Image: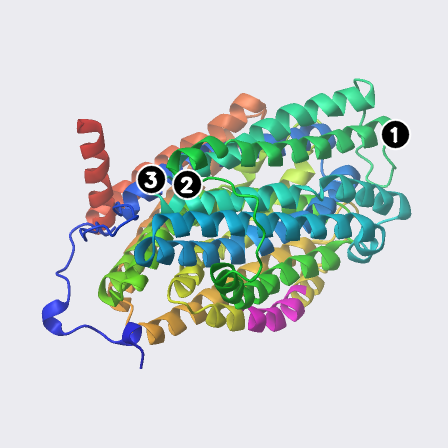
Amino acid sequence: MSDLEKDPPESEQPEALADPVIEEKSVPETGSVQPRSVARSAGIVSIAVMFSRVLGLVRETVFARFFGAGYLYDAFVVAFKIPNILRDLFAEGALSAAFVKVFTDYQIRRTEIEAWQLASLVFNVLAVVMSAITIIGILIAPWVVPLLARGFEPEKAALAVTLTQIMFPFILLVALAALAMGVLNTKARFGIPASASTAFNIFSITTGIFFAYWLSGGTWEISNDKTVIPSVAAQWAIIGMAIGTLVGGAAQLLIQVPSLLKVGFRFSPVLKFSDPGVKRVMRLMGPALIGTSAVQIKVLVDVFIVSGIEGAQSWLSYSFRLMQFPIGVFGVAIGTAAIPTLSRLASEDNIAKFRDTLADAMKLVFLMTIPAASGLIVLGEPIVALIYQGGAFRAFDTNMVAWALAAYSVGLAGYAAIKVLSPSFYALDDARTPMYVSLASVLVHAPTSYGMMTLLSNIGVTPERSNGFGHVGVALATSVVALVNFTALTIFMRRRIRRLNGREIFEGFLRVAAASAVMSAVCFFSYRLLHSYFAEHNLMVRFIEAFIPIALGGITFLIMAKLLHISEIEQLSAIIRRKFAR
C-alpha cells in the first residue's frame, strides 16, 4: 500500500471542520500560493461562469430566433461538434488535469523558474500538436462529416463540411486558452480564467451577427417547413456565425494573456518534447486522454443516432445548453476551485484533508445541482419558451426541447459530480481509473442510446412528430450513463482513499433531495395555476410563468433547508454575510 492510501494515525486526524468547504492553514511552500477556501474560490468562479452561461444562453437565443431548430442549426451543431469534442479531448479534459498536477508539483518541490520553464514548453508543444491536428481536420472534413451526418441530405451535409472547416482552428485557440486557465488557477487566479468564456460569448455573438448580416446581404428568411432547403442568403448567414465562433475563440485566449504575464509567465521559443516535465504531463495525460475520448465517442454516437431525425440535433443542443448552465455555475466551478487544492494536498501526502476537501466539494455539488435539476424538470417548458421561443423557433420546438431538457436533468447531479471526481484521481497520479470507467461506459452507452431512441420513437407519434420522442431517449441514455459513471467513480475513490465520509455525504444528499421534492411541488402547481389563468401567452406572460414559480420554489427550498438543518446553506450564508460585512 502506498503512503497515499494510508490513513494517518488517529492523533494526526484533523478535527471536524465547521466550514463545509475546507480552509487550509498550511504554511505555503516556496513558489506556491496560500490555498484559499474552496467555497470562496468556487464562488468567484461561479459568478464568472454565471455571466458566461447567461451570455451562452443569449447566444443560443440568437441562433433560435434567427435560424430556428432545423436545417441550418442542425448543420452548425454537427460542424461545431467535431472541433468542440477535440477541444474537450486535448484541452479542457486530459491536458488541463495532467498539467495542473505536474505544474503544482514543480511549484512545491522545485523552483519557480523551473515551473515557468515547464509552462512555456507545454504551451509550445501544445501549439505545434494542435496546429497539426487543425490542418489535418480541415483536409479530411469532407470525408468525416458526412459519416457522422448520415441522415443529412447532400446539400445539408455539404454546408456542415464548410462550417466544420471554418471552425476547426477553434480547437487550437481554445486549447491554449484552457492551458492558460490551468496556470492561472494554480496561482489562485480564478476570476479572469472563468471570465474567458464570457469573452468568447460576447465576441462570438457580436462578430457572428456582424458577419451574418454582411455575408447574407442584410436579411434572410427561414421556412417553418423543415424539408425546404434554406436560401443562399440564409446559408451565408450561418457561415457568418461560424466565423464569429472563431473570433470568440481568439478572444478567450487573449483576455488571459495580461494575467499570465502578471503572475510571472514568460514565453520562451523553445520546443523540447524530451523534457522530463513535458514527458510526465504526456504520460499522465495518456490514460486521461483515452478516458476523455470515451466520453467524446458517446457524443459522436448520439450525433450519429439522431442524424435521421429532422431537428433533433438542434433540440438536443438547445436543451443541453440549458442543462450545462447549472453544471458550469456549480459543478465546474466547484471542481475548478477544488482541484488545485486537492493536487497540493496529494503532493503533500495529506490524505485526511484530501478526503475532507473532496467530500465537502461533493456535498456542495449536490446542494446546488439537485434543486436545479428538479426545477428544470418541472419548469422546463416555461423556461425554454421564455428563452428560445419566437422568430423561427416555434411552440412545437419548445415542447421538444423541454422534453429533452427533462431527460438530461435526470443525470445533472451525477454529471456535475463527475467534474469533481475525475480530476481528483489525476491529483492522486491515478489517471487509469477514470479511463477504465469511461471506456466501460462506452459499451453501455451505445446500445442504451440506440435502444431508448428506438423505444421512444414509437411514443407520442403525430404527423408533425413523426419520430415520436426518439431524441428524448438519447438524452435519457446520457443521464443514465452519467449516473452509472458517477457511482463507479465514487466506489473506486472510496477504495483509493479508504473511505469518503460516505454517511455524511448521503445524509446531506437525502436532506437536499427532500427539500427539492417540496420545492418541485410548489413550482409545478404555481406554474399550472398561472398557465391556466392567462388566456394569451406573450413574452411578458412567459416571463411571469417562469420567474414567479422559480421565486416561490427558491423561497420554499430555503425554508425547507432551514427545517431540515442543511448546514451547508447556513455556512454558505455566513460566508456571504462576512463578505458583505467587509
What residue is pinned by disc 3? Answer: 43
What residue is pinned by disc 2? Answer: 523
Is residue 400 visible in the rendered image? The answer is: no
Considering the numbered disc 2 on the image, is that residue within a helix, a strand or a loop? helix
Instruction: Tell me, yes or no, whether the two marked residues, 1 and 3, touch with CB atoms within 8 Å.
Output: no
Where in the figure is residue 6, as x and y percent of width and height?
25, 76
For the point 75% across and 48% down, the residue is: 135
Considering the numbered disc 1 on the image, is that residue within a helix, a strand or a loop? helix
How many discs mark residues in the rendered view? Answer: 3
What residue is pinned by disc 1? Answer: 232
Considering the numbered disc 3 on the image, is that residue within a helix, a strand or a loop? helix
* 221 inside magenta stretch: no
Which one is in front in this view, the residue at disc 3 or the one at disc 2? Answer: 3
Specify the quadrant that holds the C terminus.
Answer: top left
Q: Quadrant of residue 228?
A: top right
- The crowd level at tag 2 (other Cα within 10 Å; few <14, some 14-19, many 20+) is many
Is residue 573 visible in the rendered image? The answer is: yes
Q: Quadrant of residue 416?
A: bottom left
Where in the figure is residue 340, as x and y percent of width and height?
35, 52
Where in the figure is residue 184, as x and y percent of width and height?
41, 42
> Magenta segment, which residues?
438-449
Q: Amino acid at mark 2?
A: Cys
Q: In this rendered view, identify the residue nearer to me: 211 or 258.
A: 258
* Disc with the residue nearer the chain's start (3 vs 2): 3
Q: Amino acid at mark 1?
A: Val
Instruction: Tell me, yes or no, whether the two marked residues, 2 and 1, touch with CB atoms within 8 Å.
Output: no
Which one is in front in this view, the residue at disc 1 or the one at disc 3? Answer: 3
Instruction: Tell me, yes or no, whether the two marked residues, 3 and 2, touch with CB atoms within 8 Å.
Output: no
